[in-house]
Amino acid sequence: MKERKVSSKSKRPTKKIMSIFALSSMFLNVVIPHSYASGNTAETKLNQQNLSSNTFNADEVNRILDGLTAEQKANINKLTGADDAEKIRVDKKDLIGSKKVNVIVQFKQDPAKIQIIKQSLAKGGATANSQAFESEYTDAKNKVNDSHANFKSFLNTQPKTTIVGGKTVNTGISITREFTDAFNGVALTLPANLVQKLVESPDVASVWSEVEYSLPDEGKSQTTATSKSVGKPTSALTYLGIDKLQADGNTGIIKSGPRAGQKVKVGVLDTGIDYNHPDLYKATHDENG
């Protein structure tokens, strides 16, 4: 998760947050139904004889599969949403005209690790032979690379110009970011009236809006600290070491300058995680589940 520094100026800049939050929530909501997302570990089974290593291998995959509930296993094949009838997840009013819009494109091809997990689930376990497993993993990564190459080739077949108001205008479709690990797809900037064309690519599962949020102007009111007390530390404050900062007098109140006396506010936008994702599994599980 990326951290953003908030400007100390009274007029806050507009924050662009790509609808990657939607991607995280899609992953969470599809793989882990809400009834399990709250922390149901009753059915979690871990191989306690062999803790997670830093290598993605058959043992790691089998450990992940053992930790999935029956419902999670039933839903894991719906990750890309490739079979959904609604491919365009963008407001229809934003699909009109030649103005540039930013979207997130999700490919049908899963990330490599998810491919391996799905294949292993279908077979009842990961391929035990290390060379064969590595070959499957390499093939999965190649499929991800191919999906990106195919989509770029598709974009190259689209018209480079369009007629607007009797004038020739460059369409200017551009990929601004590529995703391959937890999510397979790209971020795009293109004319609104070309968004519908994206789903004509056989590699595209869905198209999502890039959402923009703005932080309101808090004004210039001056507040004065009346106490050094910041309340009772919680376990989270202790875990992050914030209680030590507070003990040293770092209370989050600006001490000098034009905004002296004002408090620094820190906001966290947390869309949740899939605690069984292979990139997060080692950090979210221990020998007791």
Image (cartoon, rainbow, N blue to C red):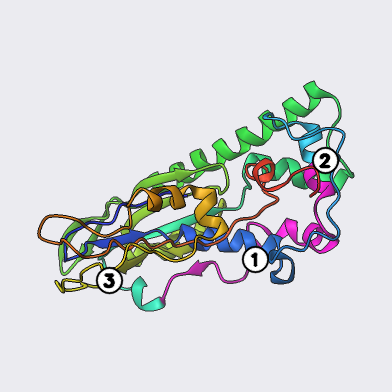
Comes first in the chain, label 1 or label 2: 1
Q: Residue 37 colored magenta?
A: no
What residue is shown with label 1? 29
What residue is shown with label 3? 97
Q: Is residue 12 left or right of residue 20?
A: left
Q: Is residue 175 left or right of residue 280?
A: left
Q: Marks 2 and 3, how far apart in space?
A: 50 Å
- At 81% from the left and 61% from the top, the residue drawn is 74
Read off the magenta span. 63-91
The answer to whether one can see residue 168 in this image is: yes
Mark 3 crowdedness (10 Å alpha carbons): few <14, some 14-19, many ≥20:
few
Q: Residue 71 colored magenta?
A: yes
In the picture, residue 41 is in which quadrant? bottom right
Query: Which residue occupies the foreground of this view, 252 or 190?
Result: 252
Q: Secondary structure at mark 1?
A: helix
Image x and y of residue 256, in percent: 14, 55
